[in-house]
Image (cartoon, helix red, strand yellow):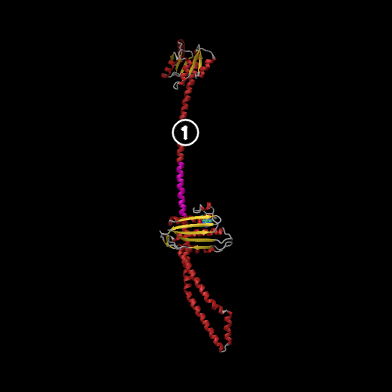
Amino acid sequence: MAADFILIVDDNSANLAVLSKSLKDFGCRVRVAMDGETALTQAASDRPTLILLDVMMPGIGGFETCRRFKSNPDLMEIPIIFMTALADVENKAKGLSLGAVDYITKPFQREEVIARVKVHLKMSELLQTLRQQNKQMAIEVERRERAEAQLKAINSQLESRIKVGDSALTQANEHLQQAQDQVVQREKLSALGELVAGVAHEINNPIGCITSNMSFVSNYTQQLLEHIAVQQAVIETSDKNNKPAEKQLVEDHAEEIELDYIVEDFSKLIESMATSGDRIKTISQSLRTFARTDKTHKQDYDLHKGIDGTLLILRHRLKADGDRSEIVVDKHYGQLPKINCYPGQINQVFMNVLANAIDALEERARNDQTPTISIETGLVGELIEIKITDTAGGMSEAVRKRIFESQFTTKTAGKGTGLGLSIAQKIVTENHGGQMECASTMGKGTTFRITLPSAT
Ligand SMILES: Nc1ncnc2c1ncn2[C@@H]1O[C@H](COP(=O)(O)OP(=O)(O)OP(=O)(O)O)[C@@H](O)[C@H]1O
Ligand SMILES: [Mg+2]
């Protein structure tokens, strides 16, 4: 308590002397002032811990002095105890309402003054500690708020970094998936190509044997028939030499085997066999053209050959099947220049689009209509245009929007991989600088339009 410093304000010097002594004895440092204004000036230069303030003073008086202390931010927190001779309640209440912490009634009881001063000094000290703690708490709160804000910022940075990492990962994954898809398709296609080329090659030798021998077969047959005619003439003649038994034998046999009919039909048969042989030869040739899968070089290629080759391979799927009648292929080929392209890849595009059309026609087979695939080709300005249209009832807009997505399929697992169109579109756009679009009308059908630059 040694550092406690009390300012006593009273116009009565006797009072000042008594109080000063008591408080000094108690161990306080004491200053005195005889009026309110002096007290304010003194307090401002040497801040007291507590003020004892007389109510009745000349000049600004106790209440006004108190009001001025309370309105000065530097001094307002100094506790003030009023000293009053007035015992009336009104003045005590007024003092307290002005911000005083207590009052002491004159004449003073030394013990009472010391006791009250002690209480208020203690309270003031506690208040001070409390304020200090409050201040520190406020600082702590602010520090924590700042730390929290920093944490939040770090968090959101982390989140966005994770997002960036995440999307990079997703992208890498997509690229990998696409690469994988292409490998799968390429494998499929090259396996198909090899198979087709192999079959075509195997067919080629025996069919070559058949067609090249056909002319001999035809000649020999002709000669044999002529020979039979000669024999017949001989028999006719021998009739005159009266050999009825032998003659009868030959005639009976000729009748039995319907020789006349055989003679008439034989050459027709030979002719149609020759035609068929030629047809197989053509098929074999176009299969070989189709299977030409040069992956490293572009080459000049007749797109119509590619379409025809593809149709040939899909022929077995066009035939009538169960409820579905045969799929009619309606070709309207225009004049097209040869195009410099990767033939194997271009054939793959035709294969994927045509296979889809057949799938759709099979799935939505209706008896009341002839399932049809129309193929139209032509030159539009500098562009080669190929339109493949089916009558399979089309697809919804929601499906149409997604068909070129890798792995999008509406087909059951195992039937569709959802790769066909995404690969086809990549081949057309990325490898050949063309475009591939799809238009579809629900209840009617679908058209795929492929355009390729004619000069490359
Ligand atoms: N001509 C068409 N008519 C109706 N829907 C079609 C047609 N062509 C494609 N679609 C729709 O587009 C989807 C995607 O076709 P895509 O060729 O990419 O994959 P897929 O045929 O399902 O499987 P796959 O990888 O075996 O080709 C199909 O599942 C189908 O729903
Ligand atoms: Mg498909």
Which residues are drawn in magenta? Answer: 158-180
The amino acid type found where label 1 is placed reads Glu
Can you see residue 417?
no
Residue wearing tag 1? 145
**In the displayed image of the protein, which residue is found farthest to the top?**
14
Q: How many marks?
A: 1
Residue 300 rendering spot, x and y as whole percentages: 42, 62
**In the displayed image of the protein, which residue is found farthest to the bottom?**
241
Residue 88 occupies quadrant: top right
Type of secondary structure dominating the magenta stretch: helix
Residue 198 rendering spot, x and y as whole percentages: 47, 65
Answer left or right for 365 relative to 154. right
* Picture layout, residue 70 above or below residue 253: above
Return the residue nearer the eye: 312 or 79.
312
* Picture layout, residue 210 above or below residue 65: below
Specify the quadrant that holds the N terminus. Answer: top left
